[in-house]
Amino acid sequence: MKSIFGYGIIAKAISSKIQAGTWNIYDDAFLKASKDEFNNNLLPSSMFEPLKSELEIISPAISPSNALAKKALHLTSEIDYFYDSLGLSIWVSGTNGKTTTTQMIAYLLNIQAGGNIGVALCNMDLKAKLIVLEMSSFALHYTKKARPEIYVLLPILDDHISWHGSFKEYEKAKLELIFRMNKTASCIVPKKYEEYLSKAQCKKYFYENELDIAKQFNIDINKIKHKAPFLLDALLALACERIITSKLSIEKLNSFVIDKHKCQEIYDKKNRLWVDDSKATNISAALACINSYKDKKIHLIAGGDEKGQDLREFFKYLAKDTKLYLIGKKDFSALAKECSFNAIRCNLKEAVNLIYKDLKEDEIAILSPACASLDEFSSYKQRGELFIQYMQENDNN
């Protein structure tokens, strides 16, 4: 019998389309054995018997320290499982900007996008000549065979340490696949890894900043509408287009619309600016947005599941006149105080209500949590939607 670990998007896609009714699906949330609508077995994790399983496809969300991952004898990732039937692919990884860069590449090249972006590989056209996949460090950790034709790596910053165990292991997950890539493949990678990747066989482009990419791929940076923190994403997408087609469709890229919850600007009825940056689930992502407004006084809502990050590194980079509101189950007030902030401890609705009363027209309200959302919300999207909802409720009172 074949097994799947974790009953998420990947498991549901594979078990409903590929030999439906033949899978054992294990999840910590299952308390007893049952069947799904396709007659697959839904089983508690404790029922997994390694010697009776011929294959185990693991959800990227399950850490290597999980009992299922430790017991498995034939562990594989979703992309390794489908790799032999897959055409050419572009992979995008890094700490921040993966989704936007992936979407921009798909938009420029008119190709399908999937992976960590929320679309299971099984639900994509595997016969397509080219696809683009957002690859999390979790998925890369479990992928040992598959390799892309182009690999785009955004900067690797402090994140997911609790899952990987250390920053070194987090970096390794992002970099090791490059040594599998062949001479016809290309990677675009931060310059700090130039020496580490010296023995990799693929064509390598290294960059320190946006100007490096613009120079190497002959891109007129002044023609690009998207500004920081999305400028790097735009340049990497254009670099991919240049490698694949030799073209640069800057005007087309300028019409690309950034997703909600990423530095999304909304004005209230008093013409005051509110910024929904709920997707900033780590320190570097939050600072990228906050720094875009550093010429204004900021009322900042932050906090949540810090994922092993040290939030001192966040607080010490904030402007000293920042008014700080801390949400989430874990209280970071003491850390904030060490960095000279007398933070207001509250929930999201209370924070929005307080800011609405206090915000001046030349100031900015930002939700940029630097933390994941699942301690209090179903997703970063729900967190962002509630932020706007609470502001609009104040507007209507």
Image: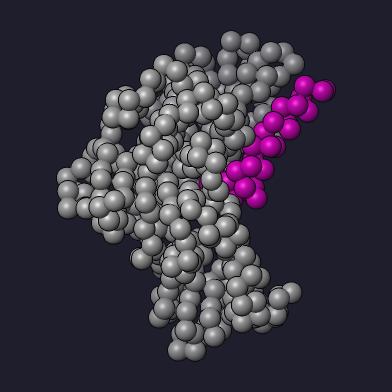
95 up-or-down from 260: above or below: below
Instruction: State yes or no: residue 383 in magenta.
Output: yes
At 68% from the left and 19% from the top, the residue drawn is: 267
Residue 202 spot, x, y in % from top left:
25, 50
Residue 269 spot, x, y in % from top left:
75, 16
Residue 315 spot, x, y in % from top left:
42, 31
Q: Quadrant of the N terminus?
A: bottom right
Q: Is residue 334 visible?
A: no
47 up-or-down from 178: above or below: below
Along the viewing direction, whichever of 213 and 170 lies nearer the viewer: 213
Q: Seen from this angle, which residue lies furthest top? A: 362
Q: Is residue 329 left or right of residue 308?
A: right
**Residue 271, quarter of the rendered image:** top right
Which contiguous range is marked in magenta? 371-397
Q: Quadrant of the C terminus?
A: top right
At 36% from the left and 43% from the top, the residue drawn is: 153
Along the viewing direction, whichever of 379 and 108 lies nearer the viewer: 108
**Residue 350, quarter of the rendered image:** top right
Q: Is residue 3 left or right of residue 41?
A: left
Along the viewing direction, whichever of 127 and 190 lies nearer the viewer: 127
At 72% from the left and 13% from the top, the residue drawn is: 270
Residue 2 spot, x, y in % from top left:
53, 81
Along the viewing direction, whichever of 31 and 17 lies nearer the viewer: 17
